Amino acid sequence: MAKIPLQFLGGMAISLLAVLLVGCTPPIPTPAPPVMIITALPPDYTRPIPPTLTPDLIPDLSCSQDSDCAFAYRTDRCCPCGAIYNREQVENTRCLRYADEPEGYRYRKWRTPRRSCSVVCSPCYQPPLGLVCDAGTCREAQTWQEILSACDPDVEKGRWCRITAAVTAFQAGERDQAVAICADVPGAAPYGIPYSEECLLNLARTLKEKDPLASAAFCREHMDAQLITCLNEAGEALSHSDVEAGLALCREIAVENTNDRFQKDACFHNIAMGVAPKDLEYAQRICEMMSERVEDCKDTAARQP
């Protein structure tokens, strides 16, 4: 009888033990990972890139006083222009920042960084000059009283706000009140024109398109330093319906300095450019009323379509 080597029996015992421990099913080899095939698609520049949508944020406009209202913009959108919110909502919403945020201002909660966008943004509309709480709801200041009360006391920062308040009063038919607001506008431009005169000129401009003669009459009554600018603008506007009447306003401009001469020549020049497409000869005669650069005016008139 043949003898089985002890080493062989030991090996079989170890194999049987391994099968019992692992199970009856032989091990399945791990399959190789699938081969990824990346197909490069040709660029299609005609398809618009879908925008990255951000969740809507409904402004809370509730308030109990004017100071509860704030103007803020979203940092999670491209080209944000701002909207009216309740101040508490701004403080508690991480993607909101005040449009007039003071330097170094610390919010109640940290703010998310402003989104980086590779787009060219169009200009935003004029932000409200003031915010009021009206019957428990925040809204933009609308009456001249509301606008004036919201104006910054600083001369430069509050200048346009006061002018807007005057124009609002003027458009509401309160002419004397508008003139009084202009008279109280402090300061002057670097070139010496008082801001009160700039304010009055803006009142005259509200009349200019509908009634240039009324605009000129208003300027004669109330203005001094900006009278020549007003007559220049009113003359051009009047020439659209009556060229000779417009030229009469140009001739009314008294020349006492270089700026006066420029305004008078500009008045004649602008009327000539408006006449040229219909009557080039007449336009060139108007150019001859200028004190200088007459030939330039004639050449430009000849090139008008």
Image (cartoon, rainbow, N blue to C red):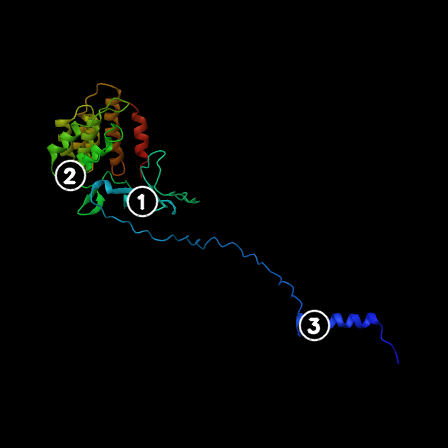
Q: Are marks 2 and 3 in contact (CB under 8 Å)?
A: no
Disc 3 marks which amino acid?
Val
**Residue in the picture at 26% in, 32% down:** 270
Q: Residues within 10 Å of mark 3 (few under 14, many from 20)?
A: few
User: In the image, residue 29 lies at what x, y percent?
Assistant: 67, 67
Q: Is 285 or 226 nearer to us in this picture?
A: 226
Which quarter of the rendering shows the C terminus? top left
Q: Residues within 10 Å of mark 2 (few under 14, many from 20)?
A: some
User: In the image, residue 263 lies at what x, y percent?
Assistant: 24, 26
Q: Is 129 or 124 nearer to us in this picture?
A: 129
How many labels sit on residues? 3
Disc 1 marks which amino acid?
Val
Disc 2 marks which amino acid?
Gln
Q: Is residue 87 above or below residue 180?
A: below
Residue designated by label 2: 171
Res. 186 image quadrant:
top left
Q: Is residue 145 visible?
A: yes
Q: Secondary structure at mark 3?
A: helix
User: In the image, residue 178 lies at what x, y percent?
Assistant: 14, 33
Q: Is residue 236 visible?
A: no
Residue designated by label 3: 19
Residue designated by label 1: 90
Q: Disc 2 vs disc 1: which is toward the camera?
A: 1
User: Quick one: which residue is furthest to the right in this view?
Assistant: 1
Mark 2 → mark 3, Cα distance in angstroms: 99 Å
Mark 1 → mark 3, Cα distance in angstroms: 69 Å
